[in-house]
Image (spheres, rainbow, N blue to C red):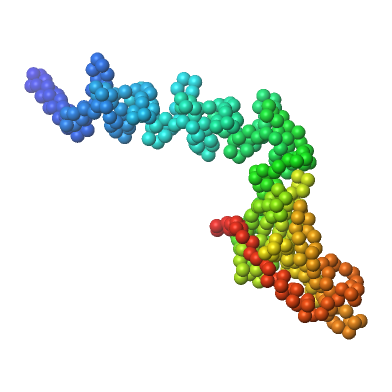
Amino acid sequence: MFRRSSKIIALFLLLCMLVSAFSLSAFAEGGSWRKNSVGWWYRNADGTYPADCWQKINGKWYYFNQEGYMTTGWQKVDGTWYYLNSSGAMETGWIKLGNYWYYLSGSGAMRTGWVQSGGKMYYMSSSGAMETGWARIDGEWYYFDGSGAMQTGWQKIGGKWYYFNDAGVMQTGWHYIDNAWYELYYNGGYTKASQPSAGYQYTEEDYLALYQPILDNIHEYYEKASEYGYLQVKWQDYGVSECCVYIDTLGYKIEDVDGDGIDELIIGSYDSEDLYPNMLLYLYTIENGDVKLVVSSWPRTRNNLMDDGCIYNEGSSGAAYTLITKYSYSAGTLSALDGIRSSDNFEMGNPVCWYRTGEFLERYPAELRIPDEEASELWGSWKEKIVAIPDLIPFAYKET
């Protein structure tokens, strides 16, 4: 019995020695946490301890004060705030403390100002606390829901409707929204109208809203044509003119063409190597608060800009006639300045006759008839004035 007990005791002592040796080895390799009456501290494997610095231990960051003790809660280090949880580990991402949410970056730094997270925008005050409800930021009003997410579009708040643009800014005054005009009031609510009040000055945002459906249609046509092939996509379904230029050379820009204070939408070709180079495919303007088409080209009636600001138009019915017209453009209206027209006129013994007129006439009096040489000279002088449309923004293809 005594011998058996002695063996058990010896085995126990051996086991204790092995455990002790293992523990000493683990300490020697990675250090260990220690605690005294003041708090927790960490002893490194070489016997030193971290103080007044950050140290990463087992994959987590800890901050030790000047005395070498682990810190918890909010700590300001080198001018930046960090939060260490009750175990001392540095927090990152969203944390809720009391009634407030805070956002800590990947480095642990407390964020202030705008924060993008999960595809939504949030605003953190100077204290780091997340904003909710109304907030005035850099002179503009924003609204954040209960989750802190910035709101856009129409929002009903306190029984009144407000509209916030894509950047989250509350809008007031006249705005073109969802194909209609609204006068938005500072304290909520709106008046809907077919057009803004007289004298209203359109903003860049208004032009984008008014012209965007047209641009969207062409972008969609491009994407479909790029994906399925041009011959498989009907251009009519997208409100796009039958192309008389290479579709991948088209672009657009929005600017005031005639200096009347209204920006036009210009769509044209930026390639001088097209079959019909530098084509002005479309010209739109705004009239009475709505979009108005002024110029449209297709294979049998083609338009170009001229260096004197006029618009050159070359039209044809096919074999019957050709009509060359020089137009001025002002205040949303085209006015014919000059033109020549060919017409079959077998009664006068000439299969093709040229007439000096900017208007289309059913019958052409003899006094309007001009020699072929004069018609050719006029035609050539106008074509020489055709210029490229500068600074067009290309329509982008969809990558497939």
Q: Residue at point 27% right, 19% down? A: 39
Horizontal side of 90 relative to 327 (left or right) equals: left
Specify whether residue 205 is in view: yes
Q: Position of residue 355 (x, y in %)?
A: 84, 74
Along the line of sight, the residue nearer the viewer: 386 or 241: 386
Q: Residue at point 89% right, 75% down? A: 367
Instruction: Tell me how many marks there are.
Output: 0
Along the line of sight, the residue nearer the viewer: 74 or 328: 328
Looking at the image, is 335 positioned above or below residue 4? Answer: below
Q: Residue furthest left?
A: 3
Specify whether residue 343 is in view: no
Q: Position of residue 132 (x, y in %)?
A: 55, 26
**For residue 226, what is the image quadrant?**
bottom right
Q: Residue at point 66% right, 27% down? A: 157
Q: Position of residue 32 (x, y in %)?
A: 23, 27
Q: Residue furthest top?
A: 37
- Pick the quarter of the image with the C terminus: bottom right
Q: Position of residue 142 (x, y in %)?
A: 59, 31
Q: Residue at point 49% right, 29% down? A: 124
Looking at the image, is 195 positioned above or below residue 84? Answer: below
Horizontal side of 133 relative to 194 (left or right) equals: left
- Pick the quarter of the image with the N terminus: top left
Along the line of sight, the residue nearer the viewer: 350 or 121: 350
Horizontal side of 169 relative to 305 (left or right) equals: left
